[in-house]
């Protein structure tokens, strides 16, 4: 197939390894997977680009315009633009990350027979599009391809990670600080350019988070290619992902063999598993006193932190609901979706 990707809103400084959030990763990882399966993939960029030290894989082409091109499938990972409706393609797939059809441009394009919406996770599909939506039957799970297979569990690691640029909920931020202090854990922070100004000024007790992190000797990492960020993830035993409803990192961590601390984020993505693993979870995080809630939450966290068998059980339960992110499964989903249009 000839497949196009509209990524004009995303920089590319390290080829497909360029660090991006949910939307950029959805496009880059689908391009990586589809190119590896022999499809010709055009990535339409909006300006300068560079592979850096990471060469583009075979079947990846960088283009600046698509006016004279025809596609079997065209991926759109950013905001809908007027010219999207005139792309010569048998099928367009838009990444959906909010309630669709909020404006006339979206309504017009989403109503076209050959334009469907894809959600990067099954949970986001249900979260974004209600059954009452006129586009409910045009929305599919188009899971971001993450890995060839699940990695072994990493219980023996002794590193912990605050990976994403989301605002942690108050009680979980207090719990993180309490847990770090109690067990003297080594924490790494990705996206320091965001964490320092946004989370750093928040107060835990009478100190700012930034000052507490300085006391604890937290490692800070700046923006880096995904392959390098993954190496930090692989060093970790657990991640802290409160507030990350919509971000892929909890799912990426589980596939990498790294268990998330149970938080609002794991309740969002792994609710059934959390209800089995942590039946008292809701009771313990319901206090209006953040300090009191933090200690109760940490009682729950201690079990996966200390018990290898429980850690592996939790990892396996989480994995049961996200296996569609593995390459073969994601590719088969893609083929099933597009076969009705080609």
Image: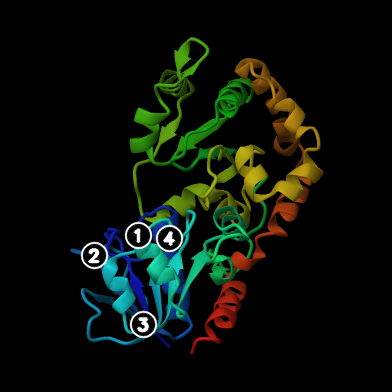
Of badges 3 and 1, nearer the viewer stands 1
Q: Is residue 136 above or below residue 206?
A: below
Q: Give the Cα separation between the discs numbered 3 and 2.
A: 16 Å
In the picture, the disc for residue 50 is 2
Q: Of marks 3 and 2, which one's residue comes earlier in the chain?
A: 2
Cβ–Cβ below 8 Å for labels 4 and 1? no
Q: Earlier in the sequence, mark 2 or mark 1?
A: 2
Tag 3–tag 1 contact (CB < 8 Å) = no
- Asked if the residue under mark 4 is in contact with the one under mark 3, i.e. CB atoms within 8 Å, the reply is no
CA gap, disc 3 and disc 4: 18 Å
- Residue 190 sits in which quadrant? top left
Badge 4 crowding class, 10 Å Cα cut-off, few under 14, some 14 to 19, many 20 or more, is: many
Name the residue: 48% across, 54% down.
Answer: 98
Q: Nearer the viewer, residue 214 or 108?
A: 108
What residue is drawn where x is 71% and y is 47%?
271
Mark 2, secondary structure of its residue: loop
Marks 2 and 1, how far apart at CA: 23 Å
């Amino acid at each position: 197939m000839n497949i196009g990707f509209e990524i004009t809103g995303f920089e590319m400084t390290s080829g497909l390894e360029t660090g991006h959030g949910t939307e950029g990763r959805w496009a880059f990882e689908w391009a990586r997977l589809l190119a590896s399966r022999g499809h010709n993939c055009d990535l339409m960029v909006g300006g300068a680009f560079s592979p850096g030290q990471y060469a583009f894989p075979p079947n990846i082409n960088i283009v600046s315009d698509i006016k004279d091109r025809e596609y079997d499938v065209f991926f759109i990972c950013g905001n809908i633009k007027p010219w999207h409706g005139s792309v010569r393609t048998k099928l367009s797939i838009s990444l959906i990350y909010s309630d669709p059809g909020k404006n006339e441009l979206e309504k017009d394009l989403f109503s076209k027979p050959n334009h469907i919406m894809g959600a990067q996770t099954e949970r986001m599909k249900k979260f974004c599009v209600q059954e009452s939506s006129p586009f409910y039957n045009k929305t599919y799970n188009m899971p971001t391809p993450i890995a060839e297979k699940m990695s072994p569990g990493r219980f023996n690691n002794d590193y912990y990670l605050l990976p994403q640029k989301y605002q942690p909920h108050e009680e979980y931020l207090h719990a993180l600080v309490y847990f770090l202090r109690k067990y003297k854990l080594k924490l790494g922070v990705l996206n320091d350019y965001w964490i320092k100004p946004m989370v750093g000024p928040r107060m835990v007790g009478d100190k700012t988070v930034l000052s507490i992190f300085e006391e604890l000797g937290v490692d800070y990492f700046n923006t880096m290619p995904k392959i390098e960020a993954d190496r930090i993830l692989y060093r970790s035993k657990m991640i802290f992902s409160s507030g990350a409803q919509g971000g892929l990192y909890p799912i990426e961590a589980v596939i990498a063999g790294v268990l998330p601390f149970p938080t609002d984020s794991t309740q969002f993505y792994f609710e059934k598993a959390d209800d089995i693993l942590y039946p008292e979870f809701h009771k313990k995080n319901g206090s209006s006193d953040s300090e009191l809630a933090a200690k109760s939450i940490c009682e729950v966290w201690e079990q996966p932190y200390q018990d290898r068998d429980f850690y592996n059980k939790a990892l396996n339960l989480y994995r049961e609901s996200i296996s569609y992110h593995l390459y073969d499964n994601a590719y088969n989903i893609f083929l099933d979706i597009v076969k009705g249009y080609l």
